[in-house]
Image (cartoon, rainbow, N blue to C red):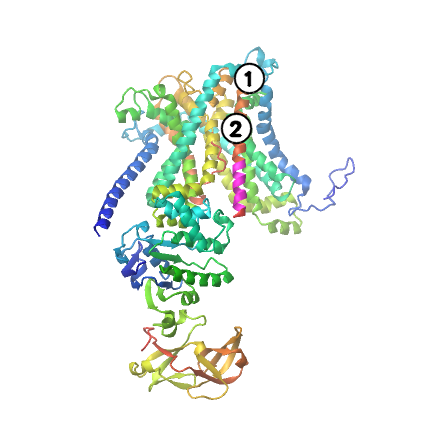
């Protein structure tokens, strides 16, 4: 009896110690992740922000400053242009291609799809930056949004086709067959039957594409030369690496406004669909 | 080898739901004990509480002489075989069986020898090097058993041991398990929802419903004298006939006939009491001639069971099922008499559902 | 499907042969549907990759004479690169970066978090996971600024917390900084991956181990790790690929000070754009593409092999 009691007591002690350690580790890790982000939450509302995290002198003036800064506002618009532009291109081309590949079995189709996926993993923005730059240069698309959109779309499309094809495969063929019986042609079927059913999948891809483009730094940094063309991702960088005093009031508000859309989208999508990583493209 | 004693065992979940509601049970050393009941009755929760995988909210549990109410699963001298066998896919059969010994730091050669001898004892000769994925269902079950008995536990727990086997294999495995337990002599508790399995295998059965014990007894006891209508209806491959009627002058009306109240209940019923008269279809006889104590009835449906038939008859407002040997199978519409076997009928109070007498 | 004959010069007549697919697409029209997408990919993904080989063998420059009249120089660029100590420095730094920040750092932290959080109260679990995820989601330019702010010499939060005013983390310990920064950014992926891998391990196996007296470490070693071996490998390969290709450390240190954080992505950029040596930059890019190829092929082999095994059991 005594032995059991002693064992139980020892176990309770080690149990307690390990619980304390566990909690400690969890707290430290949480702090590690939270610390840099605290500035993002507090500084934008501070009338006199410094790089140190401090209790703010509450104000919304920084956002007013931001709204009045033409470069910053312009860059956010550029981010939107790039995002929506890439999204539109990717959705249209992606839907067409994935639909075709889903419904028609070309010999070696699966091989092509895997090759595409492989290609997009290998030819990353970083690895291909030199030839991409040169190509856009030769096409006279340097410093145009079109150039950036084409490059981004090219990089995202393989993954999109892969995902959408899977999606299209799961749409029952009976809908298309009955439409065909009524005499509808393929384009019509795609437009009236398939796209409405595929809407959730397409919506997901649309949002995912915008998110990928929103934060992308390298491609616009490489291909856009003038501040009036650059998206927020690049302009932010220019703001704080510009020599001289960085205007923290502006930068803090800019950072928050720039980050909030993606944060919201991610967490909203996470609620709905659960987190999905698809050979994640995050450069 | 050890007896298991549970005293007022309660397992309560957050929210107040009681998986096990104040259960008292004593399982004798070496006994083959069944926990039987429908899904959600608490039998698996009770088993896992004995194992230590569920913490006990209140009450006491002893195994042998030790109070194990708060002991860790590995310290109770208990071994368990899970419903899906839980064999480690990355280890071969020998390593799987030897795993408990490895945790106890038994030397490598000794481990391997023990594993081999246990395996051979369970007809797993020659399969030592195989991976679980290469074995049949029956073989996997035996490996899981081998792993459980390799350390000579005091108690062996089995969670639905036969449900993952296909029907034909199940009967073979049943006999195998019974022999094995008898040879090993280890106290064994197993969980099942299959009453036939429990009746065939167990020395004693505990029937559970909604976390509470309904009855503990030997298979025969439970079959012949269920404590309440739930147990009466749950046990038996063909359910017991339970007919609602009223007591009048020491007799109950079944159909058009007045049947005598069973002897054990004779002094315990009140005039006018609402009761359920229960008798198993196997204890009824179909007769084409009138008989004393017979109940006139008409055949509604007959179902062939093989060497016997299950016949549904209607007698007045009551419907009964009778098991009839194939030679005497009646046709639909036939009239005749149902004759109950002496002393096989039971009486249950309708309100409390408990047996009278 | 037999090919119908088309009379020369005819406008596209309504097809006589019946297309076999559900929407009546037919091979030709399907190709038409897929063509624009595949063309885009071909032009902006495939072509640059192949062109790198050619570019790497020229002396293209951004400005000056060689910009308009590049010459073919064969393997000169490769020779230059291989003889340049800066190249080898960059390769070494990249190796360290990928190994420590990716393979070791993110994998261990991601797994530890997944393991520790598995039985924690849902509220706390969501809280911690949200923090880790937010770090991944925040755009790169913002994340790097947050860290610049944290590590700033005079007014950074880290120095004010530790009381080490004036410590120039980015200058004195640049590699450590970008490594830790990259761990901060990337751990979310590993954490999610391992979280789902761990929850897929059959609980009965863990309970079996518990029943025979295995403690937590033994359960990890004997049940969890063998069951998630495949996931561990895929995770490692993906992390390697991403860490190898990430450009974000540029935003923190721009390769400095003095080339101490001159990882390959930054080195290529510096050579080609500010440095203006497109040909040389292309040559090194080719090396990078080849390394990517190797990693990606290994990944495909592993994930194909995994699905093969699944079919069997």
What is the crowding at mark 2: few (fewer than 14 residues within 10 Å), some, or many (at least 20)? many
Q: Is residue B138 visible?
A: yes
Q: Secondary structure at mark 2?
A: helix
Chain under label 1? C
Question: Looking at the image, which is closer to me, B47 or A80?
Answer: B47
- Disc with the residue nearer the chain's start (1 vs 2): 1
Name of the residue lying farthest toward the right:
C7
Q: Look at mark 2 in the image and give the residue it sits on.
A: C292
How far from the left and from the top, in percent, is residue C280?
Answer: 54, 17
B202 sits left or right of C40 in the view: left
How far from the left and from the top, in percent, is residue B127?
Answer: 49, 50
How far from the left and from the top, in percent, is residue C218?
Answer: 36, 42
Circle on res. C78: 1
Predominant secondary structure in magenta?
helix
How far separated are the C-alphas under marks 1 and 2? 18 Å
Q: Quadrant of the N terminus of chain C?
A: top right
């Amino acid at each position: 009896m005594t032995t059991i009691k002693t064992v139980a007591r020892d176990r309770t002690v080690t149990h307690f110690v390990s619980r304390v350690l566990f909690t400690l580790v969890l707290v430290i890790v949480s702090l590690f992740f939270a610390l840099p982000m605290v500035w993002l939450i507090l500084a934008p509302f501070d009338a006199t922000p410094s790089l140190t995290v401090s209790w703010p002198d509450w104000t919304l003036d920084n956002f007013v400053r931001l709204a009045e800064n033409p470069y910053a506002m312009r860059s956010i618009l550029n981010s939107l242009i790039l995002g929506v532009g890439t999204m539109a291109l990717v959705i249209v081309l992606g839907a067409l291609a994935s639909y075709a590949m889903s419904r028609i079995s070309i010999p070696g189709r699966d091989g092509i799809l895997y090759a595409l996926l492989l290609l997009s993993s290998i030819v990353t923005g970083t690895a291909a930056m030199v030839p991409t730059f040169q190509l856009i240069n030769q096409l006279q698309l340097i410093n145009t949004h079109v150039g950036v959109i084409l490059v981004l779309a090219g990089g995202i499309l393989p993954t999109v086709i892969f995902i959408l094809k899977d999606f299209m495969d799961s749409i029952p063929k009976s809908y298309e067959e009955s439409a065909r019986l009524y005499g509808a042609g393929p384009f019509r079927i795609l437009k009236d039957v398939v796209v409405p059913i595929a809407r959730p999948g397409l919506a997901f891809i649309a949002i995912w594409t915008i998110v990928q483009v929103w934060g992308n730094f390298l491609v616009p940094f490489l291909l856009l030369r003038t501040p009036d063309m650059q998206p927020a991702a690049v302009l932010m960088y220019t703001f704080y690496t510009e020599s001289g005093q960085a205007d923290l009031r502006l930068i803090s508000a800019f950072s928050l406004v720039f980050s909030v859309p993606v944060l919201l989208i991610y967490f909203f999508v996470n609620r709905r669909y659960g987190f999905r990583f698809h050979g994640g493209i995050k450069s | 080898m050890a007896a298991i004693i549970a005293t007022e065992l309660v397992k309560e979940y957050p929210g107040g739901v009681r998986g096990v509601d104040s259960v008292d049970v004593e399982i004798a050393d070496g006994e083959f004990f069944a926990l039987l009941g429908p899904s959600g009755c608490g039998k698996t929760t009770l088993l896992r509480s004995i194992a230590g995988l569920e913490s006990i909210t209140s009450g006491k549990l002893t195994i042998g002489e030790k109070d194990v109410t708060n002991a860790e699963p590995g310290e109770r001298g208990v071994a368990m075989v899970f419903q899906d066998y839980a064999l480690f896919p990355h280890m071969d059969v020998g390593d799987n069986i030897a795993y408990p010994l490895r945790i106890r730091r038994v030397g490598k050669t000794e481990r391997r020898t023990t594993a081999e001898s246990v395996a051979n004892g369970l007809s797993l000769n020659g399969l030592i090097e195989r991976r679980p994925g290469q074995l049949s269902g029956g073989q996997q079950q035996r490996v899981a058993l081998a792993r459980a008995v390799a350390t000579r536990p005091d108690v062996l727990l089995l969670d639905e041991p036969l449900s993952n086997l296909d029907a034909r294999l199940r009967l073979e495995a049943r006999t195998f398990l019974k022999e094995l337990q008898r040879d090993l002599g280890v106290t064994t508790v197993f969980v099942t929802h299959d009453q036939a399995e429990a009746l065939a295998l167990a020395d004693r059965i505990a029937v559970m419903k909604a976390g509470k014990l309904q009855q503990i007894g030997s298979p025969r006891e439970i079959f012949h004298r269920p404590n309440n209508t739930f147990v009466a209806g749950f046990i038996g491959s063909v359910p017991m006939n339970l007919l609602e009627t009223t007591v009048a002058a020491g007799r109950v009306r079944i159909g058009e006939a007045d049947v005598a109240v069973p002897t054990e209940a004779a002094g315990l019923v009140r005039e006018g009491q609402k009761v359920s008269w229960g008798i198993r279809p196997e204890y009824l006889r179909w007769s084409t001639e009138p008989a004393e104590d017979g109940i006139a009835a008409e055949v509604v449906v007959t179902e062939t069971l093989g060497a016997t038939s299950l016949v549904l008859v209607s007698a007045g407002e009551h419907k009964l099922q009778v098991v009839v040997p194939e030679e005497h199978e009646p046709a639909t519409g036939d009239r005749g008499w149902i004759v109950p076997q002496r002393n096989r009928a039971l009486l249950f109070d309708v309100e409390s559902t408990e047996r009278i007498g | 499907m037999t090919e119908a004959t088309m009379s020369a010069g005819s406008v596209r007549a309504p097809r006589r042969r019946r297309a076999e697919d559900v929407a009546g697409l037919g091979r030709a029209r399907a190709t038409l549907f897929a063509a624009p997408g595949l063309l885009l990919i071909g032009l902006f993904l495939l072509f640059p990759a192949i062109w790198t080989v050619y570019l790497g063998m020229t002396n293209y420059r951004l400005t000056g004479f060689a910009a308009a009249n590049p010459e073919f120089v064969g393997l000169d660029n490769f020779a230059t690169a291989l003889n340049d100590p800066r190249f080898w420095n960059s390769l070494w730094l990249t190796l360290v970066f990928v190994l420590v920040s990716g393979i070791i750092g993110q994998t261990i932290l991601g797994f530890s978090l997944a393991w520790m959080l598995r039985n924690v109260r849902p509220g706390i679990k969501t809280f911690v996971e949200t923090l880790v995820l937010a770090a991944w989601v925040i755009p790169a330019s913002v994340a790097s600024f947050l860290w610049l702010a944290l590590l700033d010499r005079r007014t950074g939060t880290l120095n004010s917390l530790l009381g080490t005013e004036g410590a120039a983390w980015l200058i004195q310990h640049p590699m450590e900084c970008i490594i830790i920064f990259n761990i901060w950014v990337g751990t979310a992926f590993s954490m999610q991956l391992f979280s789902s891998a761990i929850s897929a391990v059959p609980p009965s196996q863990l309970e079996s181990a518990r029943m025979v007296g295995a403690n937590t470490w033994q359960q990890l070693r004997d049940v969890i790790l063998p069951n998630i071996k495949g996931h561990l490998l895929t995770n490692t390969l993906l992390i390697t690929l991403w860490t190898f290709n990430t450009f974000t450390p540029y935003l923190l240190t721009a390769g400095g000070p003095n080339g101490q954080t001159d990882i390959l992505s930054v080195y290529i950029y510096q050579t080609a754009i500010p440095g203006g040596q497109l040909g040389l930059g292309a040559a090194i890019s080719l090396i990078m593409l080849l390394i990517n190829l190797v990693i990606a092929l290994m990944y495909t082999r592993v994930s194909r092999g995994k699905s093969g095994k699944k079919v069997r059991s």
